[in-house]
Amino acid sequence: MKSYLTTPIYYVNAAPHIGHAHTSVMADILKRNKLARGMDVRLSTGCDEHGQKNQEAAEALNLAPQDYLDQRAEEFQRLFDLVGVDYDYYVRTTRPGHKEAVARAEQQLFDAGLIVKKSYTGKYCKGCEQFKKESDLTEDDRCPEHNNIELELIDEPNYFFPMEPYRQRLIDHINANPDFVDPPMYRGELLKMLAEPLEDLSISRPKARVSLGIELPFDADHVTYVWFDALLNYLTNLEFPGGDYQDWWSECRHLIGKDILKTHGVYWPTMLMALDLPLPKGLVVHGHWLGDGGVKMSKTLGNVVDPIEVAEKYGVDALRYYLARHMRTESDSQISAETIAQVYSSELANKFGNLLSRAGKFAKARFDGVPQMGQLTEADEAVRAKALAAAQGLAKEITLTQLPERVAALVDAAEELNAYFAHSAPWDLMKEEATQPRAGTVVYVALDSLRLLFEALRQVIPVSSDKALAMMGVDLPAAPWSPALDQLQGGAPLGDIEVLFARVD
Ligand code: MSP
């Protein structure tokens, strides 16, 4: 079975931040979950390179646009590589193949009479790269998403794509496909947006004002950029309209933050309908990370979390783990370097790392490898069952909404294993010959259950999990993965037991 997951393509007018890392890491985790279930998966992430914001950012640095874009595209790619995003397509909208496909799509709509030219007067938010209706604005006439940006009053000819003709069809589609938007809360929001007639979508700007875009094939004085251009990346990655794009397109889900629900839930489906193309399978929406104090991160407040800094200090897996464990889809969540460090130490280091180190070292020193498992007690069976159930939570399909609770179940199981190990006190049992086999069983149960938890954690923190499995001397599980107990062999050697999650002050 195929699956095609996409992330938004990010504006490159500034350095990448935690939000960009977030959606791409979430997509990566969903990809690993699908791979573990034996699916064939493709994942796209990348950069949205056209538009006014990017152009102005290049100008501010006195750089030729292409040089600026090349630098930023590399910077974003370095971040995705650093945080372990296993993408199949790294999108750059300045890629010639993408630009040609966008121009072809525009020509198709223009020829069908679905694009019209008219003069436009309105307020434009550079932050969203969207025209705003009065009803979109705050009381003091600002964009709710970009309170710090002055809206621009624009009066110029633009080409427009009228969306209204597709509104009812889109409502019907959403009603007929309950999982078109996940979680359902955003489905309600989307339907609300569709309750009123839809405006015409501006798809171009005069080249004289903004040049960083794709020239309209039917009017060389205008360029298209941002939404009409950017959204099409999801198809152009697949070499649309050629290749085997249909096989993947029919299995596409877009991961997005709640800020771009309208563009993905209204602009994009209506564009696809006009182009006579099927809609994606669905949208997977998440809430936003807020900085310390529960407010938007900003340099002035000093609450910005830099993903690169965090990854360098605590390791990539500390960051990935925190994002997966504490994100929420239906609300915003807070993040700070301190809370990442706390969770790293209280969960990754103290629960998973600690048990691996204690049980692993004990097994090596006293049993010269994996001990033999003897008769099981009720307590043994209980911790084993809990670990197995927690691991099974990641062998099933996960949605973004479910991810934090599935990770929490692994933590609970690890916590219980730690308590079991401490309480069973195998070091005491080793003192009498008669109870030594029992000590072996305890260590076996602890290690084998922990192995299962790390097999599951491979989806979230692949690097550390694979290291842990190597320390336990086991092969990485093959796909499709089906979690099972008793995969450690009594008498088998263990690898070197090293510190998995080093302490950081
Ligand atoms: N270029 C457009 C998207 C085009 S997609 C065809 C854009 N770019 S963006 O750089 O502003 O990225 C927005 C996305 O980044 C959000 O939808 C979300 O995926 C991610 N995030 C940005 N800030 C975020 C948080 N504070 N928290 C979580 N994710 C956020 O919009």
Image: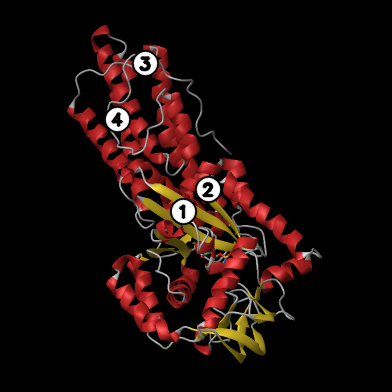
Q: What's the mark number on residue 85?
A: 2
Most extreme residue toward the right is 62
Task: Decide which of 492, 478 is in the foreground and name it.
Answer: 478
Q: Is residue 241 above or below residue 263?
A: above
Circles 1 and 2, Cβ within 8 Å, touching? The answer is yes
Disc 1 secondary structure class: helix
Q: Residue at x 26, y 33 (%)?
A: 383
Asked whether residue 238 appears in the rendered view, the answer is yes
Q: Quadrant of ligand 1?
A: bottom right
Q: Is residue 160 above or below residue 241?
A: below
- Alpha carbon separation for disc pair 3 and 2: 34 Å
**Three-letter code for the amino acid on which mark 1 is drawn:** Ala
Circles 3 and 1, Cβ within 8 Å, touching? The answer is no
Q: Horizontal and vertical percent for residue 65?
A: 75, 65
Is residue 399 rendered to the left or right of residue 317?
left
* Nearest to N terminus: mark 1 or mark 2: 1
Is residue 412 rendered to the left or right of residue 377?
right
Q: What's the mark number on residue 27?
A: 1
Q: Is mark 1 within 8 Å of ligand 1?
A: no
Q: Residue at x 38, y 76 (%)?
A: 189
